[in-house]
Amino acid sequence: MNKGFFKFIFSLIMVLIIIWIIFAVIVKCFPMYILDEEYATYKQTKDYVNNTNEYNKVLIFGDSVAKAAISPTLISNSMYNLAMAGGTPIEQYYIMKDYLQNHDAPQTIVMMYFMGGYTTLDTFFWNRTIYFDTLSTNQFNEIMDTGLFPNTLSARINFFQYKTAMPHKYYAAVKNGLFQNRKEFNERVYNDTVETKGQHYFGLELEFAPNNVSINNQEEFKPLDVIDYYLNKCIELCIENNIQVIIEQHPINISTYNNMKEKFMEDYLDYMARLQTKYPAVIVNKEFVIKPDDWFGDFSHLNPNGTSNYTRELNEKYFQYFN
């Protein structure tokens, strides 16, 4: 091969590196300009957690279902919703640790996670938690060191690609950000989430009757070992800090309940029962929460009507812990 060929290859590599650097600068320095509205809610949660703020008697942890369903402003000025879209107990454990470093411990924590979120990481963990740069490298390495995370080597490679903002991970976001005024919209979402003390809607249909396929397609309920491990760590961290834990079930519509596989239902309730046995002081709701279609804005999330009704019911149920 002649020198010209090597010069061409070297030039090509340099061009790719420059493109990579440009993408990394855009992603790391201007995420509010390119990422979608869920990033704004993630940022608002992280900003709140990592700064010393007012005391909260009650905190809400969970995923987007919990973030939409529970409105602190309808209950108490001393409640905050720290649920995160696509959240699992994995990153929420680290959010909880960070919160306790910057705030006095609350009296009560409500945990509410989507049933289907216990059994997969592809959609929830990678496409939200890591995509939004929620975990530090040390925190991610700690997760890998448990030996429970599936495909550890490929996971480390994938994390590196996100952490260094490789173009193929963020190309769509950068492209869309060029043609949409996402910063203005994201700032509005951020400020709205501040006003609602962490609550945010995801589905706004007035009624939603179809079932949640992501639940109904599962023949059995078997949580991933790493999610089970971190759920237990969350509970134990609360116990260490004298925090009352309430594990509540997320609302589902009638069609979803009617189409769930029997073994999936049995396995899930058995899992809840085992948690109750292991941690007697924890309050565990071991029944499905079935609500009318006009409470749902999409297949999984409550709409404003559902949120106001569900929040009111939750407050009545746990009044002694919330007020």
Image: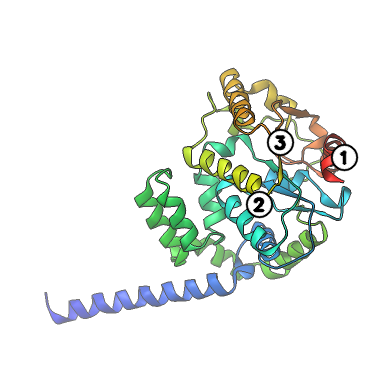
**Can you tell which mark lies on residue 312?**
1
Mark 2 and 3 residues: CB-CB less than 8 Å, in contact? no
| Residue 160, percent from left and from top | 41, 61
Badge 2 or badge 1: first in the primary sequence: 2
Q: Which residue lies furthest to the left in this view?
A: 1
| Residue 195, percent from left and from top | 82, 61
Mark 1 and 3 residues: CB-CB less than 8 Å, in contact? no
Q: Residue furthest top?
A: 262
**Can you tell which mark lies on residue 84?**
2
Element under label 3?
loop
Badge 2 or badge 3: first in the primary sequence: 2
Viewed as shown, does residue 223 lie left or right of 86?
left
Q: What residue type is labelled 1?
A: Arg
Task: Say which residue label 3 marks.
Answer: 250
| Residue 59, percent from left and from top | 74, 50
Label 2 Cα crowd, 10 Å radius (few <14 / some 14-19 / many 20+): many
